[in-house]
Image: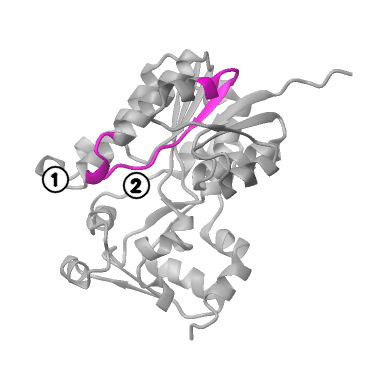
Amino acid sequence: MNQIQKSVILVAGAAGLQGGAVVTALIAKGNFAIRAIVRDKNSKASQALAAKQVEVVEATFDDLAGLTKAAQGATGVFSVQMGSHPGNKGEETRHANNLVLAAKAAGVQQFVHTSVARAGEQEHFVDWDKGRWEPLYWQEKTAAIEAVKAAGFPYWTILKPPYLMENLLPPRDAVMFPMMAQGKLNTPIASDTKVDWLTGQDIGRFATEAFTHPAKFNHKELSLVGDKLTMAEVAEALSAVIGKRFEATSLTEEEAVSSGLFNWGIEPYIWQNVEGYRIDPQEAAGYGIQPESLQAFLESHKSYLKALYAGLA
């Protein structure tokens, strides 16, 4: 009996959080063959993917010919790029464009791209005209989205997550919440600001559903949210699951700057107070997926977290 030919999905960032979540969800679905773009086929991450029967193909986002070759025979592409900052100006836009061009040249029918909630709305942000809120970040996110939408794919979907719950785990916690190792969530986020949260795994689940039901997700820009919590509520959830004391403190802008803790600056935290992601949970409610709550996310990492914070009071 001939084996049924599975549709091939090409996954960018397969060794990272979001791309890795897509790989996991696609494997769980069982209906797809998976091909991953990697920098080094011999790396541990690449070998781990190969052990899961994922085809690994070496290419970089700056290698248009390599990307096009990787996309040959694929029916769908999952796209994710690193966010921009002054040190890599133009890189995110260039990388997104190259992946789009490669997919088009290879005849890919469906393109699923992950961005960030409120990308494209930045010109309406308070004080945008004064140069606030890291303009480069938002402009390049928007440019990537527009490249996908303008390419003419028969099917495209844009996923727009907010803060990822994985920011509470190493190694991201050291950057986002520099005193978390001491049980302190000290940030410039105001005490009454509700932050929108989502798990990386839910990005994988939504992307996989989009590949499974292309027409249902076609021409959709979906902002996704699993929980809306103040930092005090986050601390309470951590305390309840881990059994150690976590405390949230809201710093003033001056305190945050003088602390020297925030290597990437404090604007993203202040933006939460002034603008925020403002995601309506009903926006993605009709797509068959119930995003995970922070409590459930922490419970799923309970053993690891309890060991990690065993030394806390």
Residue at which label 1 appears: 127
Q: 10 Å neighbourhood of mark 1: few (<14), some, or many (≥20)?
A: few
Q: Tell me: 118 left or right of 223.
A: left
Q: Secondary structure at mark 1?
A: loop
Tag 2: residue type? Tyr
Disc 2: which residue? 277
Residue 85 inside the magenta-drawn segment: yes
Magenta residue span: 69-90
How many angstroms separate mark 2 from mark 1 (CA)? Answer: 16 Å
Can residue 281 be seen at all in this image of the molecule?
yes
Residue 31's label in the rendered image is none
Could you say which quadrant of the image residue 53 lies in? top right
Tell me which residue sits at (55%, 35%) in the image.
207
**Percent x, y of residue 219:** 45, 22
Looking at the image, which is closer to me, 10 or 166?
A: 10
Classify residue 132 as left or right of residue 68.
left
The image quadrant that residue 175 belongs to is bottom left
Q: In this rendering, is residue 197 above or below 308?
A: above
Residue kind at label 1, given as amino acid type: Asp
